[in-house]
């Protein structure tokens, strides 16, 4: 990789293996954060009524982690879980975990590249609840793995209440993820989602009953899950597969295949770029 290339942009546009170099942040170079600050300054000039909002959410902070922690704390606070307490939690995790620092940048690049409604990096950090829920989950997941399960579950509950997105803190989710709209997304405890996956609203990755153990779906890298897709049980959606909107999936889906229907059936095999990157998710007559 050349020194003038942005690792976030390259990765989000098609490299499944993360090219993020944590030395970028150690050296003080952060092109994503630089872009967010420039966008906020321009927006404050164009829309003075939002200048205080933009200052509080972005321009008053020294790094992306601080700004994101501030936004999340103020979105998720309630009378018994105060914004100041949440700030301490978010800062304590995000400021010291290089994996999360990488993920929040790959995710915001994914939103910018794949969601046509995402006007800028700054709009993602300030307004998009799919991005907010995903980053708050990452903190809850860290807490869960540290044995702080009650606190992780408290965060999960607030994320679900505020954003309408329910992600169990034990679920494992890669980076470069797009949660488009996000409303109604449910991701179960033992679900696994690979890098560079795009998920639309209403998607359920659930179990099939009261069984315990490994009971939720596994989603391969580069897959695309259309709106209101339901995938049940410990089954696999192969890398680069596409599940069309409204489908019910009860068995494994091969890599780079399109499935649709209730129950889902194989429509065709795909060539070329992963569907998560193109976000073309209609199973129209050309597939049948």
Image: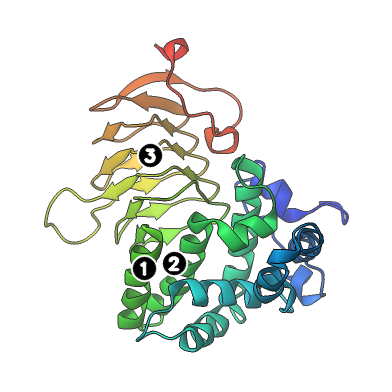
Residue 53 image position (x, y, % from top left): 66, 70
Give the farthest residue toward the left.
Answer: 210
**In the visual, does 47 lie left or right of 259?**
right
Q: Give whichever of discs 2 and 3 has the lower sequence position.
A: 2
At 29% across and 40% down in the image, what residue appears? 230
In terms of depth relative to the viewer, which is nearer, 279 or 182? Answer: 182
Measure the C-alpha gap from mark 1 to mark 3. 21 Å
At 31% across and 35% down in the image, what residue appears? 252
Q: Which mark is residue 137?
A: 2
Q: Which residue is mark 3?
A: 237
Measure the C-alpha gap from mark 2 to mark 1. 6 Å
Q: Give whichever of discs 2 and 1 has the lower sequence position.
A: 2
Establish if 69 lies above or below 232: below
Residue 283 occupies quadrant: top left
**In the visual, does 134 lie left or right of 11?**
left
Residue 151 image position (x, y, % from top left): 35, 82
Q: Which residue is mark 1?
A: 169
Residue 164 image position (x, y, % from top left): 36, 57
At 30% across and 59% down in the image, what residue appears? 190
- Mark 2: few/some/many CA within 10 Å (<14, 14-19, 20+): many
Residue 160 image position (x, y, % from top left): 34, 63
Instruction: Name the secondary structure under disc 2.
Output: helix
Eye-nearest disc, 1 or 3: 1
Q: Give whichever of discs 1 and 3 has the lower sequence position.
A: 1
Query: Do the residues under discs 2 and 1 have CB atoms within 8 angstroms?
Result: yes
């Amino acid at each position: 990789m050349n020194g003038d290339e942005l690792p976030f942009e390259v990765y989000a546009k098609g490299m499944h293996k993360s090219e993020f170099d944590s030395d970028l942040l150690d050296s003080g170079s952060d092109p994503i954060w630089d872009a967010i600050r420039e966008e906020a300054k321009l927006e404050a000039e164009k829309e003075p009524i939002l200048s205080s909002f933009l200052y509080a959410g972005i321009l008053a902070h020294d790094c992306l982690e601080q700004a994101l922690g501030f936004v999340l704390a103020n979105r998720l606070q309630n009378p018994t879980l105060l914004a100041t307490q949440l700030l301490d939690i978010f800062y304590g995790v995000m400021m010291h975990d290089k994996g999360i620092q990488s993920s929040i940048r790959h995710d915001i690049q994914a939103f910018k590249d794949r969601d046509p409604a995402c006007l800028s990096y700054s709009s993602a950090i300030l307004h998009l609840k799919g991005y907010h829920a995903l980053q708050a989950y990452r903190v809850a997941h860290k807490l869960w793995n540290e044995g702080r399960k009650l606190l992780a579950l408290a965060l999960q509950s607030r994320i679900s209440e505020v954003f309408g997105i329910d992600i169990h803190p034990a679920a494992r989710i890669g980076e470069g993820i797009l949660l488009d709209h996000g409303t109604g997304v449910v991701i179960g405890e033992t679900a696994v989602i690979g890098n560079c996956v795009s998920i639309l609203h209403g998607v359920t990755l659930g179990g099939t009953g009261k069984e315990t153990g490994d009971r939720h779906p596994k989603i391969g890298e580069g897959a695309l899950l259309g709106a209101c897709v339901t995938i049940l049980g410990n089954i696999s959606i192969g890398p680069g597969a596409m599940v069309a909107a409204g489908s019910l999936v009860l068995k494994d889906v091969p890599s780079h295949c399109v499935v649709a229907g209730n129950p889902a059936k194989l429509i065709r095999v795909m060539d070329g770029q992963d569907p998560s990157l193109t976000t073309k998710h209609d199973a129209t007559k050309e597939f049948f």
